[in-house]
Image (tube, coloured by chain):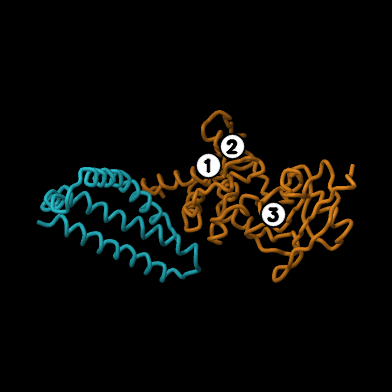
Amino acid sequence: MLDMRLYMLQRLSALVMAPLVFGHIAVMIYAIGGGLSAAEVLGRTQGSVGWMLFYGTFVVVVSIHAAIGLRVVLAETIRIGRLPLALFSWAVCLGLLYMGLSAVHAVTAS
Amino acid sequence: MPDAAASLSVSVWRGGPEAGAFRSFDVPALKNQTVLDVVAWIQRNAEPTLSYRFACRVGMCGSCAMMVNGQPRWTCRTHVRKVAEDGRLEIAPLRNLPVIKDLAVDMDPFFDKWVKAEGVFHSSTDRAADIAPVRPSTPARVAADAGIECINCAVCYAACDSVAANPDYLGPAALNRAWTLLNDAKDSGRVAILDAVSRPGGCTSCHSQGSCERFCPNELSPLTSIAGLKREAAWRFLRKES
């Protein structure tokens, strides 16, 4: 269900994700507390390589981390074969990647 | 001395691997009484065909573990007054292991996993060699000593929700044993042990919920041992050691 490779991938993705989560929370508090409008937010993010890298990395590590975590939850909740488990994990990972990177593209592309 | 007015209401699991049910018994309540005393009273006075395991009666052999009011306990050292709820006891076979009959479970899967986790001594010398000195103060020996008082009672195995969810998971006792051997200066099975605990079902299947530590009657911490194995296995993976 979870070999050493996947286990390490989940741990390392968490390692990268942790500071990004704090950064994201800080951004949310700043944006909401300061009362930034959507236009003001987009004004800061569009064309910004920094924000693209920040949220692009965030999306990639979240997609990996969540897919492996849900894989374990599913395997321990219902009896499921290796192939359906692998398909499920890839579907979650690619689904999150697609949605996340689309969102990042929408707010950072100039 | 029995207190004539007091009795315990005890439900005991009766049945084999396929079917069974709880049966109720009234057992005289004593001031000092263990759960194993209650089971023995029922067998001797009410239900002669009741099957259960025990041997030493003093918490050394690890054979009398059962579920008591839904929690795994070593019954010979568990006082009724500490676990009875309103004078009621529910006694069932250990969780996570196949039932043979009544309160006796098949311990084979439990011990098979000890072997699967390489929880066996790996010798590097023969009997002609000098006895290797082992310093009690080295960090490795301190880590090993912290886990070696396991009596193989399977209480941790029954308490573990990860075992319940994943039957391939080796479980806390086997991994604790692997950890003590990994830290044993006389054991030469480091590669074999880390290979065994790095496979699916090994230490990576532990969710660190800590029920093993919560229920271990000898107050060991398999959780700490498993964390140690995770650490060693992770470093080995990163260094690409074979």
> Quick one: label 3 or label 1, which is nearer the N terminus?
3
The residue pinned by badge 2 equals B146
The three-letter amino acid code for the residue at tag 2 is Ala
Residue B164 % position (x, y): 57, 59
The residue carrying mark 1 is B224
Task: Kindly identify which chain the residue marked by label 1 belongs to.
Answer: B
Lower sequence index among marks 2 and 3: 3
- Callout 1 amino acid: Thr
Q: Nearer the viewer, mark 3 or mark 1?
A: 3
Image quadrant in which you'd find residue A95? bottom left
Q: On the rendered image, what quadrant is the N terminus of chain A found in?
A: bottom left
Asked whether the residues under the numbered discs 3 and 1 touch, taking CB atoms below 8 Å apart as contact, a structural biologist would say no
User: Callout 2 environment at 10 Å: few (<14), some (14 to 19), or many (20+)?
Assistant: some
Q: Between B60 and B25, which is closer to the camera in this rendering?
A: B25
Q: Position of residue A104 (x, y in %)?
A: 20, 57
Q: Determine the chain carrying the residue at label 2.
A: B
CA gap between label 1 and label 2 equals: 9 Å
Q: Which residue is mark 3?
A: B67
Q: Are marks 1 and 2 on the same chain?
A: yes
Q: Please state the horizontal and vertical placement of residue B92, each as a whole percent of the image.
A: 72, 58
Q: Do the numbered discs 1 and 2 sit on residues whose CB atoms are within 8 Å?
A: yes
* B67 lies left or right of A8: right
- The residue lying at 74 percent from left, 66 percent from top is B21
* Foreground label between 1 and 2: 1
In-image side of B141 versus A105 (left or right): right
Q: According to the rendering, which colour does chain B have?
A: orange
Q: Position of residue B204 (x, y in %)?
A: 47, 52
Residue most toward the front?
A35
Report helix, strand or loop for mark 1: helix
Residue in view at x 73 percent, y 56 percent: B90
Q: Give the color of chain A as drawn.
A: cyan
> Which residue is at the front of the view, B227 or B242?
B227
